[in-house]
Structures are given as C-alpha cells and as structure tokens.
Amino acid sequence: MNYRHYRKFSCAVCLLLLAGGLLAQPNFKVQGLGLLQDRSLKNRLVFLQSLEGEQPVELDAVLLEDSAFLLLEQLKRDGYLQPTVEAILTTSGATRRVLWTSPYSIQMAADATAEEVIFKIKPGLLAYYNEVSIQGVSAIDVDSLQRYFVPGGVLFQTRRAKVFTSENFERRIGRILQSLEALGYREARVVEREAARDASTGAVNVQVKFEQGPQYYVGSLTHLIRKDGQEMEQPITVAADTLLTRTWEQDQRSTYRNEAFEAGYPDAVVVLQRTPVAGAEGAGAKTFDLQVIVDWGESAVLGEVRFQGDEATRRTTLRRRLGLAKGEPLNRLEVDRARRRLMGLGIFQQVAVDFEPESGAARDVVYSLEPGLRQELKLLGGWGSYEQARVGFNWEHRNPFGRAHRYEVDAKQSLKSTRGGVRYSIPYVFGSDVSLYSKVEYNRREEITFDRSNRGVSFGAAYTTVAGVRLSAEYGFYREQADREDGLSFKSEETATVASLGLRVSYDQRDNFLAPSSGWNVYGELKVANTWLGGSVDFQKWESGGSYHFPLTESTLVHLGLRGGAIFTTEDADQNIPFNERFFLGGENSLRGYREGEASPLDADGDQLGAETYALFNLELEQRVYPKFSVVLLFDSVLHARDGFGAETQLLHSLGLGLRYQTAIGPVRVEYGHNLNPREQDTDGTLHLSIGSPF
C-alpha cells in the first residue's frame, strides 16, 4: 500500500476516533446495529442535539423523547418497516425501561430524568424492492427502467442494496421523469403508482404507470438584444431535430446572460418565449419557435474589494489571488471565479460574495470568509503483506503567518521501515497558479536481503493546467546508503550523495482513483543526477506508466496496467548508479507471485540486485459478486534486466486469484499469486493482504 492509501486510511481512523472519543459522552449510548452503525447513529444524535464532547449529558424527558423520535425516523429512512427503540434508564443504581414504537408517541412524564441511558434498537424487517412493473414508457428500454429501482453491476443483489422507502420510491420516479424530460418529453407525468408491502418478509412490489406525452422540438430561434436604449434582432441557426428540453433552454439563458456579464452589465436579464408552430404537431411531437430576449440593463464598474471575517489571514495574500482591479467593468463571472480561487487556497470552509450597493454604476465587492480547520492531527494506519502493520501520524498546520502557507509533519513506523519528514508548501506564488514546496525526509527500510536508508532535502514547484495535467519540477539533495551482506558478487555504488533535478507529468481520467471502474491515467517522470548539481554520481532515471479500466459486462470489469523504467549513465555504472536507485519489482502492487522486491534480478546466493530496466504488465478480471465484494483473476508479467535491455533479460509471470471488499478507503485485498516460471531460488507463490487499488 503506497502513501496515497495511507492518507485515505487516516481519514477512516480519524472518523473512528471521533466516533469513539471526541463524541463519547459516557452516560449516553446507542446499541443494536453493530459497532459502526451504533456510533454513526450516536454521532448524529450528538450533532442534532448540540451535545458537548466528553461531558456527561443532562438527561431530561425532552432530550430522551427527542432522541427516541430521531432514532425511529432515521431507521424508517433506512428502510426498516417497524423499528422499536427501548431506553434503559439508570437513576441512583435503579434501572427502568421505556419503549417507543412506530408511529412515535410520547412515553415519558414531563419531569422524568435519568443519570444514564442506553438506547437499545430493534430495527425489524427491512423493506426492499422485490418486483417492479413500469408501464407507459417507450423512450427508455425496460432494463434501464429497472435499474432506476434495483441497481445492477453485480451477480447477486443484497436486500440492503434494494432497500425501499417512501422517499427513495418518489426519488426514483422523479429520476425517470427527469430522464424523459431530457429526451424532450416535457409533459411526461405519473398517472398511477402503487407499492404493496409484505409485512411478513419486507418484500415490496411496485407498479408505476406513466403518460409519456409528446416530444418537444425546436423550430426557429431568434435573438433579441436590448442594450443602451437600442434593440437588435437576429436569427440563430439551429440544428435539425434539436430537442427542446429544460437543459437546452437553461443553456441558452446562460450563454446570453454570461455574454452581458463579461461585458460589464451585471443586471442582465434573459427571457425565453415559446410559440407553438401551427400544423407541426403529430406523430407524438410538438415544435416551437423561440425568441431569446436579452435586456442588458445598465453597465457598472468595480469599486472597492473588501473582506469580512478571518482577520488572521493577510489581505495582501487574498488580493493576489483575486485578479480584480478598481474601475474595470464589473464582471459577475470574474468575481465568482475569484471567489473560487480563494476557496482553492484550502484555508476556508466557505467564501460568500455580495455587492454593495446591490445596484448602481459603481459597486463594491465584499467577500465573507469563514475559516476552515487550521490545525489537524491524523492518526495513520494500514497493512501490507511485507511490512505488515503500519502506524503513524500526520500533523498539518494550514495558514501559518496568515499567508495561506501550510506545513506538515509526518512519521510512520512498520515492522520493516521507519519514515519521517517535514513539508512546507506555499500555494499560488505571487498570484500565479504555481505552488512551491520544500521537504526534509528520512527513510529506513529493511528489504529481503539488504537494508536501505536515505535522508535529505528537496525543493520543488507544481502546477496544474486548465485541462487537468499535473506538472512538477524538483531539486533534491539526498544521502543514500545500502547495507548489503555480500557486495562482492555485484559491484554497485552503495553509499552516494544524489543531487538531482526531477520532472513529472501526470493526467488522471479515472472515475475513482481509490477503486476505478472506468477511465484511464498516465504519468511520466525523469530524474537527472549530476556532480555539477552537488552530488557524487551521474545518472538519468526514467519511469512512466498508466492504467486503463473498463466494464466488460454489467458486473465484470477489466483493469489493465503498464509501466516501465530505465536507468542510464555515460560513466561507469558500478560507480554512478546507486544501489538504492535500482528497480526492485515484486509485491502486492506489481508482480504478486513474489514478496516486495523479491522479483528483481538475483545473484547466485539469491540476494536482490535490482534491475536497471524493466517493463511491467498487469491484467485483472474483476467479477462483482455483491455490491462490495468481488472475485479477481489476475495476471502479472515483468521483463527486466540487471544491466539494461542490451544484456541478459528475465521474463517472470504470475497468475492468481483475489478477493476484494470495498471500503471508504479503497478495496481490502486478499490475493494469491502463483509463479508460472519461478527461478531456482523463487517460491511457488505468495499470499498478500493489502489495502488500495494496485494500479
């Protein structure tokens, strides 16, 4: 599991600590649904009732009755038909019980109190969609209509995945109407609906009948502009068979209103008028001629820019992010873009914008700032098949000195490694979109046949383009050391000062980087180390790769990964390529028939030597069995060479099976990789337990 998985795991750990610690009122408990759900319900009550963190709660009748009502309502929203909530109240060592059922009714006297309460929950039967019948819709195929009520994408659906409530029944009907409207059926409506529930099983059979109505089309389109006391009308060309949907109308309004906003007319109003085309009705369709009337109103200029709230943040820092100048045309769109740039600093929970006065030829812009969390401690945790348990912490301070900077201190410890570091970041330097950072790091790790360590500093800059391409450049100065038991069979620079320049570019189009099911990503990085940069070695290191994910069937996914790398030097390799910089393949995220680093080239004694060049291919076929549970067939293959592709190469393959359980921090993976062509020193295979997507 790599660093990004640590960070996501830290979020879950913090939530659990929050559930069990900061919100742990000692005399107020919820039981009956399991540890996580009990804590979730309790936290919800604590929030809604505005209870103090670790202080005992004053338990009066109002608090107890309100809590019981909220619990019943939440259970009904979760799909339980007949939930009950029983309170076990303790006063001076004596206990008594109070029971609430649905529908809720008051059960306690107005002056009742208690010293301690345990809410025992019995949820009852879970209501779920059993059979769904939809009539009157021809524009959407039957299977797609079913998916509005019963989700697909797995071999077997649990009742929890098909939960029925009155609210989600109405939402699903509403989504069908929205889909019909997007297809031009503006008059679509529901004429009948029925939900028959079986009180003994929780099964719900629903029947919904729609009246689809005619399909709306655009005939002609005319644009009428009223500006500075003048009117100008012009026809607009519209593609044939253009559907007249609410989204299309909204796009027209936005386009012409934004044109006026950009020109400095902040009060522009757009009205769209429809006129039915006589004689164009028939065959289930209606056609309309449209006129877009744009009243630009009066122009205005930007007055002062002011800030309210969060006095700890320097105003000069904020103004550099705005890009607004007094006296220029008042562009509402640019004012909002500036607001988003302020949010991009990462130090505000919310930024609101107002104009003072609301009308007039000159208007001030006022940004109201609501500070976000400025200091945060995260406890980190994880598991990997080689390092096993990993624990640590991350301390982050946002906005020190009031300049929107941030620094982080982190430390991690496992059974095989120790890591620690400090990072200082300066976002959006001089009002640009470039961020600067510096790092001080220390790493020590026990590999299978050697120990490695490095310590040093680095300075870098990062930039993300409008298209989403991430670019970064970095200078690093590190002391690297490898402690090998036998350095005679293969000579390499084991102790080196590496001073380097690094460049990295990446682009991510995956739908979910924690557990992708579609999309792709690519990256490439180049590291150039040289003595004229201050180091003791000269080499160039390149690595690039990517992944591609797509559904093969509704419940079957294909994951493809490809990456490769090489180290070059124009000098003597054994004196200029540090041993730590070599590639060590194998492990839960590369060749899964091997432990971490075990698939690298070996010497005669079976010790790791690492590769100068490699190409790795990963293929996974994932079958979703239940919404959160999958079975995976995996194949990994690596081609590598100890001294480059011009020398002797090795090709290793692993074939295996895995089980995955999806969580909020990524999939928990149990995988076994079997080596198809093991070397003499290799094992037949390896069992891995890890968290996070492998590529």
Image: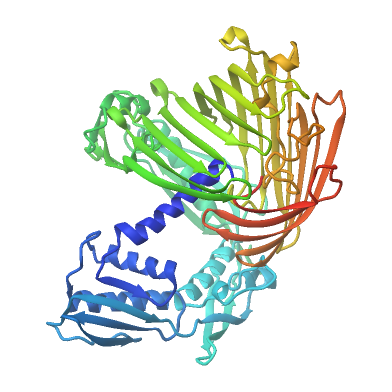
Name the residue located 57 percent from the left edge and 77 percent from the top edge.
Answer: 159
Q: Nearer the viewer, residue 675 or 311?
A: 675
Q: Position of residue 522 (x, y in %)?
A: 67, 36
Name the residue located 43 percent from the left edge and 41 percent from the top edge.
Answer: 257
Question: Along the horizontal axis of the image, is 146 left or right of 266?
Answer: right
Question: Along the horizontal axis of the image, is 639 left or right of 263?
Answer: right
Name the residue located 71 percent from the left edge and 52 percent from the top edge.
Answer: 550
- As drawn, 572 above or below 59: above
Q: Position of residue 152 (x, y in %)?
A: 65, 68
Q: Position of residue 361 (x, y in %)?
A: 26, 31
How are the colours assigned in the image? rainbow
Q: Nearer the viewer, residue 406 or 505?
A: 406
Q: Residue furthest left?
A: 111
Q: Position of residue 244 (x, y in %)?
A: 57, 56
Q: Quadrant of residue 260?
A: top left
Q: Residue furthest bottom?
A: 200
Name the residue located 60 percent from the left edge and 24 percent from the top edge.
Answer: 481
Q: Nearer the viewer, residue 583 or 516?
A: 583
- As drawn, 8 above or below 232: below
- As drawn, 91 above or below 459: below
Q: How many marks?
A: 0
The answer to whether residue 433 is seen in the rendering is: no
Q: Nearer the viewer, residue 127 or 664?
A: 664
The answer to whether residue 344 is seen in the rendering is: yes
Q: Quadrant of residue 302?
A: top left
- As drawn, 535 above or below 109: above
